[in-house]
Amino acid sequence: MKRYGEHRFPGKLFVVEGIDGSGKSTQLVLLHQWLKAEGYGVVFSEWNSSPLVRNITKRGKKKHMLTPATFCLIHATDFADRMERNIIPLLKAGAVVLCDRYIYTAFARDVVRGMDPKWVREIYSFAPKPTVTFYFRVPLEVAMKRLINGRNGFKFYEAGMDLELSQDAEESFHMFQGRIIEEYEKMVPEFEITVVDATQPVEAEQAQMRQLVKSKLAQAKRLRVAP
Amino acid sequence: MRETYGVVLPGMSLADLTGKLIVIEGTDGVGRSTQIDLLKPWLEQQGRAVVDTGLTRSALAGKGIKQAKEGHTLGPLTLSLFYSTDFTDRLESEIVPALRAGFVVLTDRYIYSLMARAMLRGLDVSWLRNAYSFALKPDAVFYLRIGVDDLIPRVVFSRGFDYWESGMDLHPSEDMYESFRKYQTALLARFEELAKEYNFEVIDASADVSTIFRHLRDGIARVLSGEPQEPLFGVEPPKDVPETAGEKKTVEMPPSRKAAASEENEQRNKENVAS
């Protein structure tokens, strides 16, 4: 059983992390387009998207059945399924894999929900270490403003309503995300995460990402996929 | 106070878990559920409230695991974490509340089966120990021990070989018989290691149903006798259990006792009405 940092793959793994409204998904979509155009065999994987598991998570969330422990474990199950069936084989084959959220999302959320930090890190210790992890650092107020314009209301777990911080969803979301940011900040040095100033214009952030990704791919053999 | 094997889950108070947690462990087809079906009424006869639980019975993940296993595409980590989700849901929403209410919780397998299976599929013992370190330490673990030669006929003449219990995901090129033998032999060896590490009480499961039941009953009575509460009735197996030759035949509850029991029930009903 290989642990974090012990895997040796020809493929490359790039990860984006950050709170909702930080703009990380937009940036990953742009990176994906660029890599495809450059001719790389590139695959995109989203948090909580395993076909075997995600409906269970969805139902558990809808019915408010999830405790901090089961919330953690069902997401770990989803992640493990994507790793075992999809991401690890792709990395072995030499693909470029892009992940929208990775183990650091779990570390932040689960620890805020009261799970033991060491325990959660050990649970996810089977995850390969990313080539680069980009953390989109954004002040909470900026992210909130982006989100409130774009959607109506917050979902129960998304706003951390299970923590009973506040009866008001918007206020709860605010408090919950504030704590998530604190956890992310602790992880930046712990996991050698690359910080992106997410208050910049979209193009500036993308340019920073492409430059770093390019330098990492320069050393890699390019996996050509048939058009 | 009750303990876990390491970490404590958020919101789970370990104080006042006054019930008893009793684990029945053993491999597939060894007769665990038969025994639990006998133990439950026996405990209830003595006035003990009983909750029984077992793998894949959680409201959250039980159905999902069964569906996913149909596809035969689960990797070892996914399988292990899926079972862990199921276990945790039952621990938090079934086992702990029942222990808090003073129930006897009979569980058909516990973390040990999950660990043994996962070890065979290549997961590290240290990873598994951590993953299940929030589990409550049970009051007793009864391990139904059987050799693979005694196990095979039981499985063949009952429901036949199951894909996963035969380890077909590990030896896909083998026929099911060979794979079952290989897999169960390895699994039983893991159980022996766990038996030492976690102090299982070992029961010879090659014996007949009633002998195994008697051993379990005596063991459980011992665990329960630490409590001040007096049993309502004597410790007798239910009448439909055939006893082995040479053993005293179990008779139906004596009429005097039956009368006493129904009187007590009536008395209790009256009290309930009064209050």
Image: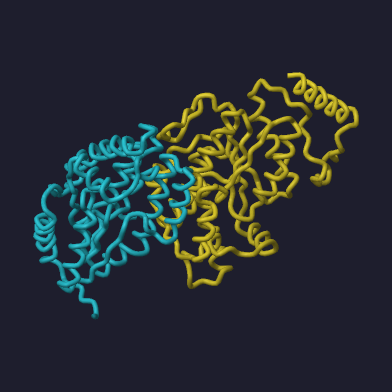
Q: Residue at x 20, y 46 (%)?
A: A191
Q: Residue furthest right?
A: B255
Is A180 in front, or is B87?
Answer: A180
Quadrant housing residue B240: top right
Going 45% across and 43% down the picture, which residue do you hit?
A66
Of residues B263 and B162, the one nearer the viewer is B263
Please name the residue shown 13% across and 55% down the image: A202
Pinpoint residue A210: horizontal percent, then vertical percent: 12, 61
Point out the residue furthest to the bottom here. A227
- Using the image, determine if residue B12 lies above or below residue B87: above
Which residue lies at the image location 44% right of the left edge and 44% below the top edge? A70
Residue A173: x and y, percent? 31, 39
Q: Is residue B126 left or right of residue A28?
A: right
Is residue B216 in view? yes
Image quarter of residue A10? bottom left
**Considering only vertical position in the picture, is B135 above or below A29?**
above
| In this view, A167 is above or below B110 | above
Query: Horizontally, is B269 left or right of B156 in the view?
Result: right
Quadrant for the N terminus of chain A, please. bottom left
Q: Quadrant of the C terminus of chain A?
A: bottom left
> Whole-percent x and y of residue B168?
51, 66
- In this orientation, does residue B182 appear? no
Check the rendered structure and report the hue given to chain A: cyan
**Horizontal arrangement in the rendering, residue B73 relative to residue B160 (left or right):** left
Indicate the position of residue B109 as horizontal and vertical percent values.
57, 46
Along the viewing direction, whichever of B104 and B90 lies nearer the viewer: B90
Figure colour of chain B: yellow
